[in-house]
Image (cartoon, helix red, strand yellow):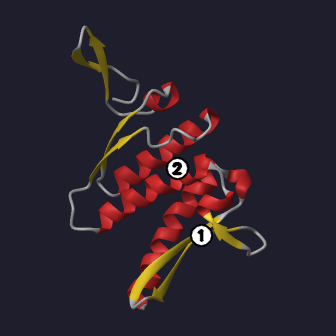
Amino acid sequence: ALMYENLSSKLGDIITEGIAIVFPDAQLKFVVNFVERRNNVEADILLEDSDGEQFSVLDDSGGGLADFIALLLRITYIILSEHNNILIADEPLKFIDRDRIPEASQFIRKVCEDFDFQLVFVSHIPEMVAESETVYKVTKSKGISTVKRVDTKNS
């Protein structure tokens, strides 16, 4: 039980911090409740508003917030597992509105740096590409793909 409480607290802290930075007007806290069901421990993933009301991330929060939380959950799962600290994702923040992309990208970059984690992602969102450390542009002509490294301000 103590292990689950510690895990819940660590996940909650990281994701709540990200929510506060990227979605400051939402004033939401990320909560993980571990419960036993059918002789297994399962996690209820919830958001808690300033009144203490809890609700499902998917039910009432919008696609951008759910996308952001899902990416952070995948990163923290890999960090806490025995797997290599790398994740390859296709358009991981496609539902976040563009005004929030710089903050989301900067927070994810901070998490990756803090935990020595590599995130490789595909994106067509210029604001996300601009915040990337290394960028490769893939173009296709006559059925042949070409990959070229692009200089960015962050490399």
Q: Residues within 10 Å of mark 1 (few under 14, many from 20)?
A: many
In contact (CB < 8 Å): disc 1 and disc 2: no
Task: Give the number of the disc on residue 67.
Answer: 2
Q: Upstream in the sequence, badge 1 or badge 2?
A: 1
Q: What type is the residue that disc 1 sits on?
A: Leu
Point 30% across, 20% down: residue: 138
Point 25% across, 18% down: residue: 148
Residue lying at the far top of the rendered structure: 142
Point 44% across, 52% down: residue: 71
Question: In which quadrant will I find the C terminus?
Answer: top left
Report x, y in % for residue 66: 56, 54
Q: What type is the residue that disc 2 sits on?
A: Asp
Report x, y in % for residue 67: 52, 49
* 105, 54: nearer the viewer: 54
Point 43% across, 60% down: residue: 73
Residue lying at the far front of the rendered structure: 38
Report x, y in % for residue 134: 31, 30
Q: Quadrant of residue 20?
A: bottom right
Q: Is residue 89 found left or right of 82 in the rendered image?
A: right
Residue at the spot of label 1: 46
* 42, 115: nearer the viewer: 42
Q: Is residue 130 found left or right of 62 in the rendered image?
A: left
